[in-house]
Image (cartoon, rainbow, N blue to C red):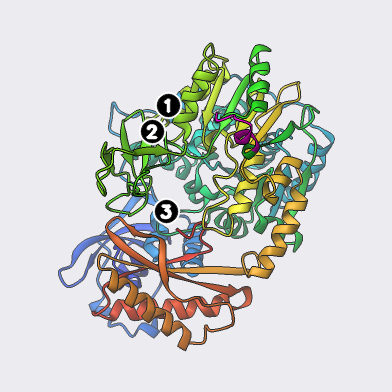
């Protein structure tokens, strides 16, 4: 007889504990999925084994005769012991429940039904890819990575390379070295739209049978089948979005995170983990090499490299030796004063026309989808807002509806102001739909495509749009950040950043960093072939440091300035930001319970100067019919463990207090304060 300690598959905070069961199967291992009787009614529940021992823990003081028995063991689905250790780390780091962490690591649903089993790899027809020669800088990079692979010890490398410097080839060479030693590789990409390009490169180099694919666009059956391909050792390369970091490899040799700076690696659902940090932690657990690749390192990663936590590798030259694009700034205030009311500056229009006439392609980038940003009455100032979330709704011309970009609610656009009855209700601001329309007017003889969340909703649609552009069927591609990340098009002559100001005004201490990164990444799509590209940055704030530094290609200057500001303001990497959000359908309840938690924290000793901030309505005060109040703690790095313990104790007290009505969410280093 063995005794196992399990976590029950139950979302209640009351059951977020280990439970001991007896098991007659001597071969049971940690990570096994089992069925056990639970609660007074002995209802059968799924559970996951975290430890196996010959006798009950004496500290629990259990009567062996009253210990319930495991009813069934799932022979197919089990977690590795390394993933169990990662679960424990996630709970400690993000204060999530054990089961929340476990659910990141197991596939939803079951196997695909017979006759409906479609392998997602069949979508990729790839020519065999032979390894090209390496540049001097690429060889130097591999010379630093290879000893860690050969010695089978963990190290994290920040691969800081300018756009088109050949970072992907280093990923491929690293994978080749790892696979040759009988180990396995995880490759993470920030967006599903980038997965086809990456998958194509890896399948072309290593063959489809060795590659598994894992992302949220797959059906539940496909995700289950791909997960089992990995778990059963039938694939030794996994390519996916952030959930791919939890792939059940037992001989992991390398984790590669492409575009490590991207905010999409931060989960916006419970548990709110950071896949970059999870990848580094998993590398430590598995003794694997971790490569964080980017042309614009996050300020936190760059600082960690400075402090010696990461080893930085620089690639300062493009692979084909083509110079970086020429970047110019168009001051849209001057354009307006000179009579140009178009969304295209004269400089951008001229350069785009010249490039198109020379057989080149053009990208127009705007990180805002829809047709108009908001709908307002010019008579009384009324703004059409979502009844559920309370934020302004975006007009979409394709549907003719106003849409909330948070909850997805749609409503008809009023022709008369609901507030004052005026007919002067109009659409204001621009989104990618409007840019697409204006591009068709400005360049009537050219084919225009658009890639954003609206056009990419249907499965396979984003790849269809990108494929048309890659094959030259589309002359002009309009898009959001989906076109700015890692896409490799050889014939792009001009990139126009329609409004560089969009991300500057977000209520987030990272807004300058985000602006710099998006401009640099979008600019990097130009001139990747044999000719130097042109980039035009349109802005109403040409003196902003992030915009000036991006135009000059001055990452170091931007980083030094941003680091000084973060140090003065007490932001990461010098602190950890802990955000507590309270929400309830009754606004007074959310406000009252946020205030109670704040006072409890203050009395517990979290009251250092500039560390604890009083509760305020969240930027999105009303969301999904709930009112939201929040407050933040700027936690000194050396106090993180202490502060998390205090917050964990407050959460435990709330669980046992029947008078508590609101839900409390805990976010560690949130990417957005909305």
Q: Is 495 rendered above or below residue 427?
A: above
Horizontal and vertical percent position of residue 537? 65, 36
User: Can you identify the residue that label 3 sits on?
Assistant: 104
Mark 3 residue element: helix
**Could you tell whether 35 is left or right of 554 in the image?**
left
Circle number at residue 579: none
Mark 1 residue element: helix
Mark 2 neighbour class, 10 Å CA radius: few under 14, some 14 to 19, many 20 or more = few
**Picture residue at 54% right of the left edge, 50% below the top:** 263
**Picture residue at 51% right of the left edge, 87% below the top:** 605
Q: Residue furthest left?
A: 41
Horizontal and vertical percent position of residue 534? 71, 27
Mark 3 neighbour class, 10 Å CA radius: few under 14, some 14 to 19, many 20 or more = some
Of residues 434 and 218, the one drawn nearer to the viewer in this rendering: 434
Q: Is 659 rendered above or below residue 272?
A: below
Picture quarter containing residue 64?
A: bottom left
Instruction: Please tell me whether residue 90 belongs to the stretch shown in magenta.
Output: no
**Could you tell whether 248 is left or right of 608 in the image?**
left
**Picture residue at 28% right of the left edge, 26% below the top:** 115
Q: Is 357 rendered above or below residue 323?
A: above
Of residues 229 and 355, the one drawn nearer to the viewer in this rendering: 355
User: Can you identify the residue that label 2 sits on?
Assistant: 457
For the record, the magenta segment spans 334-342
User: Can you identify the residue that label 1 sits on?
Assistant: 461
The answer to the question of whether label 1 and label 2 lie on touching residues, with beta carbons closer than 8 A, is yes
Q: Residue furthest right?
A: 136
- Distance (Cα) linking label 1 and label 2: 7 Å
Query: Who comes first in sequence, dot 3 or dot 2?
Result: 3
Q: Is 81 rendered above or below residue 440?
A: below
Instruction: Please tell me whether residue 339 belongs to the stretch shown in magenta.
Output: yes
């Amino acid at each position: 007889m063995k005794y196992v300690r399990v976590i029950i598959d139950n979302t209640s905070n009351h059951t977020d504990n280990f439970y001991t069961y007896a098991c007659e199967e001597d071969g049971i291992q940690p990570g096994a999925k089992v069925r056990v009787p639970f609660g007074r009614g002995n209802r059968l529940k799924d559970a996951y084994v975290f430890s196996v021992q010959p006798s009950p823990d004496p500290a629990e003081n259990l009567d062996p005769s009253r210990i319930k028995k495991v009813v069934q063991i799932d022979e197919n689905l089990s977690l590795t012991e390394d993933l169990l250790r990662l679960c424990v780390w996630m709970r400690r780091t993000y204060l999530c429940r054990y089961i929340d962490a476990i659910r990141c690591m197991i596939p939803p649903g079951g196997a695909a039904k017979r006759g409906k089993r479609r392998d997602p790899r069949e979508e990729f027809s790839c020519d065999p890819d032979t390894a090209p020669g390496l540049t001097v800088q690429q060889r130097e990079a591999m010379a630093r990575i290879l000893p860690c692979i050969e010695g089978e010890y963990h190290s994290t490398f920040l691969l800081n390379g300018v756009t088109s410097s050949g970072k992907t080839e280093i990923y491929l060479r690293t994978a080749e070295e790892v696979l040759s030693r009988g180990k396995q590789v995880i490759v993470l990409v920030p967006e599903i739209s980038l997965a086809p390009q990456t998958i194509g490169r890896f399948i072309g180099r290593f063959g489809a049978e060795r590659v598994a694919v894992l992302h949220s666009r797959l059906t539940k059956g496909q995700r289950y089948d791909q997960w089992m391909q990995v778990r059963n050792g039938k694939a030794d390369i996994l390519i996916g979005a952030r959930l791919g970091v939890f792939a059940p490899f037992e001989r992991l040799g390398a984790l590669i995170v492409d575009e490590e700076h991207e905010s999409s690696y931060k989960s916006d659902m419970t548990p709110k983990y950071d896949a970059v940090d999870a990848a580094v932690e998993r590398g430590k657990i598995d003794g694997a090499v971790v490569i964080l690749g980017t042309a614009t390192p996050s300020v936190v990663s760059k600082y960690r490299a400075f402090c010696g936590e990461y080893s930085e590798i620089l690639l300062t030259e493009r692979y084909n030796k083509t110079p970086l694009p020429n970047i110019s700034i168009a001051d849209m205030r001057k354009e307006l004063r000179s009579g140009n009311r178009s969304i295209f500056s004269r400089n951008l229009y001229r350069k785009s026309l010249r490039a198109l006439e020379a057989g080149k392609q053009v990208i127009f980038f705007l990180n805002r989808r829809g047709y108009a940003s908001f709908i307002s009455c010019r008579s009384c100032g009324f703004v059409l807002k979502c009844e559920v979330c309370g934020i302004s709704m975006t007009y979409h011309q394709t549907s003719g509806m106003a849409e909330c970009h948070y909850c997805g609610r749609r409503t008809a656009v009023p022709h008369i102001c609901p507030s004052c009855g005026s007919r002067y209700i109009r659409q204001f601001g621009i989104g990618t739909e409007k840019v697409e329309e204006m591009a068709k007017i400005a360049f009537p003889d050219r084919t225009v495509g658009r890639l954003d969340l609206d056009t990419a909703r249907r499965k396979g649609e984003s790849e269809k749009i990108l494929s048309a552009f890659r094959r030259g069927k589309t002359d002009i591609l309009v898009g959001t950040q989906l076109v700015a990340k890692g896409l490799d098009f050889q014939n792009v002559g001009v990139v126009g950043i329609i409004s560089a100001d969009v991300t500057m005004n977000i209520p987030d201490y990272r807004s300058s960093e985000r602006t710099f990164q998006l401009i640099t990444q979008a600019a990097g799509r130009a001139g990747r072939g044999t000719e130097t590209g042109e980039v035009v940055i349109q802005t109403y704030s040409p003196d902003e440091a992030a915009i000036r530094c991006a135009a000059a290609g001055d990452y170091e200057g931007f980083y030094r300035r941003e680091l000084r500001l973060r140090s003065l303001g007490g932001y990461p990497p010098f602190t950890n930001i802990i955000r507590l959000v309270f929400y309830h359908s009754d606004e007074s309840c959310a406000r009252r319970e946020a205030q109670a938690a704040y006072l409890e924290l203050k009395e517990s000793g979290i009251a250092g100067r500039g560390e604890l901030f009083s509760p305020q309505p969240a930027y999105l005060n009303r969301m999904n019919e709930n009112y939201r109040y929040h407050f933040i703690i700027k936690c000194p790095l050396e106090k993180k463990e202490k502060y998390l313990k205090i917050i964990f104790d407050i959460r435990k007290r709330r669980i046992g207090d029947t008078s508590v009505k609101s839900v409390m969410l805990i976010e560690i280093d949130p990417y957005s304060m909305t």
